């Protein structure tokens, strides 16, 4: 799974969202680590993601920059009990001016090169990214709504129980 963070796992607090209402948006304020740390976890993602993490490889691919790695890693531990490393949490280099979608496209190319035989599923809130995922042959799921419709079947269920669900 390739999973975005902002608006996919994390809902920005009203204080962070307020930064985007100015003209031009206050991106520095929006990306302050102390504000990022207060994001709310999306409850439906908290219900499903731990089970996905138990059975599948997950790579978090975010438009956040490396300056937010520590706060993002702590947030993922606190809300999803997931410990990251540089291979499981891909973040833009500080100073990278690419649009998030441009950065993510490059990272996806690297993943395909490193893991050519993996069937990927992406969970993201960015409509533009959905087009990129489809173009690259990745199955996209639209967040945060997709979390409401997902449930994880336990591997020890009998076939009949699975069919009833």
Image (tube, grey):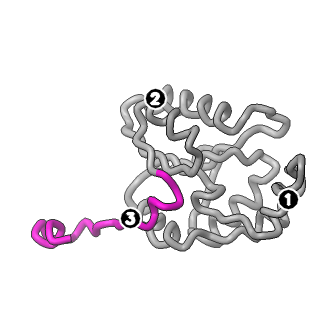
Q: Is mark 2 on a helix, strand or loop?
A: helix
Q: Distance between the residues labelled 1 and 3?
A: 31 Å
Q: Name the residue under label 3.
A: 149
- Side (left or right) of 17 relative to 143: right
Q: Does the magenta stretch include residue 157?
A: yes
Q: How far apart are marks 2 and 3 (CA)?
A: 24 Å
Mark 1 vs 2: CB contact within 8 A: no
Q: Name the residue under label 2.
A: 135
Mark 1 vs 3: CB contact within 8 A: no
Mark 2 vs 3: CB contact within 8 A: no
Q: In the image, residue 6 lies at what x, y percent?
A: 66, 56
63, above or below 113, in the image? below
Q: Is mark 1 on a helix, strand or loop?
A: helix
Q: Residues within 10 Å of mark 2 (few under 14, many from 20)?
A: few
Q: Which residue lies furthest to the left in this view?
A: 160
The quadrant holding residue 120 is: top left
- Side (left or right) of 80 relative to 34: left
Q: In the image, residue 115 lies at what x, y percent?
A: 45, 33
Residue span colored magenta: 142-165
The quadrant holding residue 17 is: bottom right
Q: Residue 19 bears which disc, if any?
A: 1
Q: Distance between the residues labelled 1 and 2?
A: 33 Å
Observer-nearest of 44 and 88: 44
The quadrant holding residue 94 is: top right
């Amino acid at each position: 799974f390739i999973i975005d963070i902002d608006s996919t796992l994390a809902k920005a607090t009203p204080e962070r969202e307020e930064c985007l209402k100015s003209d031009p948006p206050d991106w520095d304020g929006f990306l302050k680590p102390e504000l990022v740390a207060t994001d709310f976890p999306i409850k439906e993602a908290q219900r499903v993601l731990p089970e996905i993490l138990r059975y599948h490889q997950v790579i978090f691919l975010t438009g956040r920059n490396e300056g937010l790695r520590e706060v993002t890693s702590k947030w993922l531990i606190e809300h999803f009990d997931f410990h990251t490393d540089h291979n499981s949490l891909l973040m833009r280099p500080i100073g990278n001016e690419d649009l998030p979608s441009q950065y993510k496209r490059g990272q996806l190319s690297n993943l395909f090169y490193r893991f050519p035989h993996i069937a990927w599923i992406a969970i993201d809130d960015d409509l533009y990214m959905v087009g990129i995922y489809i173009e690259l042959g990745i199955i996209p799921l639209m967040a945060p709504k997709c979390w409401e419709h997902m449930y994880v079947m336990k591997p020890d269920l009998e076939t009949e129980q699975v069919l009833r669900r």
